Image (cartoon, helix red, strand yellow):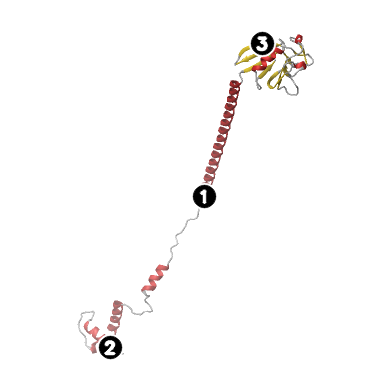
Amino acid sequence: MDSKNTISTRFFIKNFHPINFIPLGDDQIMKKPILFFFFSILICSLIGCKDTNTIPEKNSIQKGVENQLYIPSIPPSNNIEQNEQNQVVDQKAEEAKKAKEKQEANQKANEKKKQTANEKAKKNNTKSQNQKANPYKITIQTAKKKLTLYKNGTVINTYDIAVGKSNTPTPKGTYKIVEKAENPGGPFGSRWLGLSVPGGHYGIHGTNNPDSIGESISHGCIRMNNESVKALYKVVEIGTPVEIS
């Protein structure tokens, strides 16, 4: 045994005996090996082991703890619940789409109604303006052989006329005066008022045969005395409506 370690041990045991702190002599210590053995074990347990191979370093412990990863357990997704949620989302999207389409359709319908109302109002305004600009209207009764001139709905004058023969009748309908001419000559007399009859050349005119007035004798035109057609010619304008019945 190393003398230095033996002296230290002897000193410690001599001064700190665990049983009764009774100092022992050198020869007494060496004579009691069993007591020394257990006492040595007790000392080692009290002061701890200094073997670096058995005690991990503090830094290594700390690093090991820091490097540990905590991975929480994630429960598996509920496919049925997810599908129900997706269906709800799709249903809401479809409802929003239908609502938007309905709104757009209503908006288009309102715009169309507004456009129709504007066109109708414009047409009425144009008609009103035409009536104000041209207050005259002519009606022709072929059976009675009469031509009546109106101004703002009031009768201004009535004239005797001649109309078409049975095989060349005067066309019935609503037309407009589209042409005016003075002194066309020949059978047309002193004035000509052309009508907007489609597919033919018809008009109100004078005559070189005054005796034909009151008869169904023309090729479809309306004949008047020259003096009467001159008076009519002065007041009516192009665009004046003519109703033939």
**Residue marked by disc 3:** 158
The residues bearing labels 2 and 1 have C-alpha atoms spaced at a distance of 80 Å
- Taking depth in this image into account, of 177 and 62 the one nearest to the observer is 177
**Which label's residue is closer to the chain start, 1 or 3?**
1
Q: Which mark is residue 6?
A: 2
Q: Residue at x 28, y 81 (%)?
A: 39
**Residue marked by disc 1:** 82
Q: Nearer the viewer, mark 3 or mark 2?
A: 3
- Circle 2 packing at 10 Å, graded few (<14), some (14-19), many (20+), is few
**Quadrant location, the C terminus:** top right
In the displayed structure image, the side of residue 244 where residue 124 appears, left or right: left
Q: Quadrant of residue 196?
A: top right
Residue 193's place in the image compared with 102, above or below, is above
Report if the CB atoms under discs 1 and 3 are less than 8 Å apart: no
Task: Provide residue 159's location: percent of width, then percent of height.
Answer: 68, 11
- Taking depth in this image into account, of 64 and 232 the one nearest to the observer is 232
Q: Quadrant of residue 49?
A: bottom left
The residues bearing labels 1 and 3 have C-alpha atoms spaced at a distance of 90 Å
**Quadrant location, the N terminus:** bottom left
In the displayed structure image, the side of residue 93 where residue 15 appears, left or right: left
